[in-house]
């Protein structure tokens, strides 16, 4: 018991609250789910502030300045927390907020109850014989199994409106069939999200919030700029990691610094191996950042309630346009205007190749223009396709268990999560390597070739 | 055959054809790379890099078909 007990309570409450909020957001209304999640968060912050205050007031340094300061800070935090709670009570359904608030308390009661139960004689007799324990568990499970159709049936008879009540237009499940099947029932809901055509992705934080407030202006704004917000979030995350890793750079690195240094060094060697030691170092920062950023964006979608920004065509087109513009700029800068045009014309030196210029020039220009299209479509298609694959298998997992009205499905998507890890890494690598090669094609070829030969001779 | 039926037939068949094509291409790439690695095991790194790039280029064709399918599939 004590602080360690509270720590465990906090951990279980986070999990329990997340699951309950998810189920409510899916099966009741999204706004209720949001309210439950916020209620749990509020209650957890409240508990930890109380704990902080109690520790500060009863600890050994309660007469000293730091202890008093901590107690004051905690009480100021409580005041702010209650102000936030008042705002939440006005904005969100109070009943769901209250249920969310109760979750950590229920966890405390259950945990304390189970601690009491562990000492009793009945529990010792129950776990004394593994066969008897297993038998009792199986019997209880069978009884619940036998009773569950009755319970579900009673619920459906008692509240026939409950099955049509959810107004969320699409969870991860059955979205397409519902849109086609019953347009009249959900006409109101679908008209609010009428602009969302095409396949549905997993819900993320922003879609949940924007469905909870279907009429608010800011929620609509958030939903429209989803990809931008998530990519900015990823960028901030990458910046934060780099800042943490290089804050106290030491000769004997800590694990984080070590990992980042290893990554940077590998990327450096890799890109220098392609571009050569003369031109390479100037472009390593850009290309390495590209790799790290795209990798982080690809893998960001595997975090629950987050979305890969690269599964939106806008982000990948932006990245590819940056690479395109930079490679043209490199071409003009390194070769000069004349050299650049000469390169586009296929470097004519002999009369025959001069005659071929009218043919070569359009081909080269079209090749240059095709590069950003293929870069962006490849990245988008792979990441988006992976997302769709996961959605399809989650849907399959839910429909396999739907005959028993189970709120959760079989985790059929598990193997494909590992495939998503592989694809995300590989596509980030491919994007970087292709950009590097586009740069290489723009750099002066001759002296690179000589240096390469010199390297081989060594 | 109206527009919707044509799309309903054409999209899956188109994806399948694209997959056949890039499957043949990927098989050829893998075949060449494996043979090259077998001949020159010390050049494995360079060969694998080139193999991954060319494999990505070949795979991209199926991805284009896939993206087209996703763009057109709401119209079925």
Image (spheres, coloured by chain):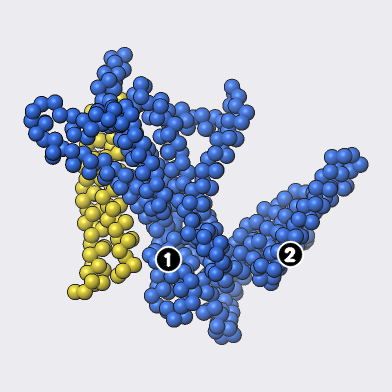
CA gap, disc 1 to disc 2?
34 Å
Residue drawn 43% across the image and 70% down it: A194
| Percent of width and height locating residue A57 | 87, 48
Mark 1 lies on residue: A196
Q: Is residue A73 left or right of residue B24?
A: right
* Residue sitting at the far top: A458
Question: A192 or A145: nearer the eye?
Answer: A192
Residue drawn 39% across the image and 64% down it: A199
Q: Residues within 10 Å of mark 1 (few under 14, many from 20)?
A: few
| Percent of width and height locating residue A10 | 70, 54
* Residue sitting at the far right: A63
Q: Which chain is yellow?
A: B
Q: Which chain is blue?
A: A
Identify whether A314 is placed above or below A286. Answer: below
Q: Is residue A350 left or right of residue A144?
A: left
Callout 1: chain: A
* Residue sitting at the far front: A337
Q: Residues within 10 Å of mark 2 (few under 14, many from 20)?
A: few
Residue drawn 61% across the image and 69% down it: A32
Establish whether labels 1 and 2 are both on one chain: yes
Mark 2 lies on residue: A86
Disc 2, SS: helix
């Amino acid at each position: 018991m004590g602080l360690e007990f509270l720590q465990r309570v906090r951990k279980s409450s986070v999990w329990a609250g997340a699951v309950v909020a998810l189920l409510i957001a899916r099966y009741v209304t999204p706004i209720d789910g949001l309210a439950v999640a916020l209620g749990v968060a509020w209650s957890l912050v409240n508990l930890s502030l109380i704990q902080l205050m109690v520790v500060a007031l009863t600890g050994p340094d309660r007469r000293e300045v730091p202890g008093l300061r901590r107690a004051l800070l905690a009480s100021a935090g409580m005041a702010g927390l209650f102000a936030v709670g008042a705002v939440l009570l006005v904005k969100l359904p109070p009943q769901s907020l209250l249920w969310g608030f109760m979750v950590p308390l229920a966890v405390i009661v259950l945990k304390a109850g189970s601690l009491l139960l562990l000492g009793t004689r009945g529990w010792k007799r129950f776990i004394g014989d593994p066969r008897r324990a297993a038998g009792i568990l199986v019997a209880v499970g069978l009884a619940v199994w036998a009773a569950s159709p009755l319970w579900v049936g009673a619920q459906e008879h008692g509240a026939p409106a409950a099955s049509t009540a959810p107004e969320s237009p699409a969870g991860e499940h059955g979205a397409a069939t519902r849109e086609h099947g019953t347009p009249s029932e959900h006409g109101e809901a679908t008209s609010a999200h009428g602009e969302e055509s095409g396949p549905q992705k997993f819900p993320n934080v922003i879609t949940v919030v924007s469905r909870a407030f279907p009429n608010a202006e800011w929620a609509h704004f958030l939903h429209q700029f989803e990809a931008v917000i998530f990519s900015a979030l990823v960028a901030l995350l990458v910046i934060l990691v780099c800042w943490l890793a290089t804050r106290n750079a030491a000769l004997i690195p800590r694990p984080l610094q070590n990992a980042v240094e290893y990554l940077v060094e590998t990327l450096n060697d890799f890109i220098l191996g392609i571009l050569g030691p003369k031109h390479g170092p100037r472009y390593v920062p850009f290309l390495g950042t590209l790799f790290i950023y795209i990798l982080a964006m690809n893998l960001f979608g595997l975090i629950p309630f987050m979305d890969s920004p690269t599964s939106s065509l806008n982000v990948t087109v932006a990245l590819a346009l940056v690479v395109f513009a930079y490679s043209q700029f490199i071409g003009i800068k390194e070769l000069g205007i004349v050299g650049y045009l000469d390169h586009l014309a296929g470097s004519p030196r002999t009369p025959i190749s001069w005659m071929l210029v009218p043919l070569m020039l359009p081909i080269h220009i079209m090749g240059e223009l095709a590069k950003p299209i293929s870069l962006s479509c490849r990245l988008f298609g792979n990441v988006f396709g992976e997302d769709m694959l996961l959605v399809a298998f989650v849907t399959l997992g839910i429909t396999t268990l739907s005959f028993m009205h189970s709120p959760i499905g079989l985790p059929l998507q598990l193997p494909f999560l590992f495939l998503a890890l592989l694809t995300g890494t590989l596509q980030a690598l491919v994007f970087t390597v292709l950009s590097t090669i586009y740069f290489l094609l723009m750099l002066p070829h001759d002296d690179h070739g000589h240096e390469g030969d010199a390297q081989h001779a060594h | 055959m109206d527009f919707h039926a044509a799309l309903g037939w054409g999209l899956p068949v188109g994806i399948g054809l694209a997959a056949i094509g890039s499957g043949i291409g990927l098989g050829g790439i893998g075949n060449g790379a494996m043979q090259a690695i077998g001949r020159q095991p010390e050049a494995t790194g360079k060969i694998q890099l080139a193999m991954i790039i060319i494999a990505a280029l070949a795979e991209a064709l199926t991805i284009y078909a896939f993206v087209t399918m996703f763009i057109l599939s709401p119209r079925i």
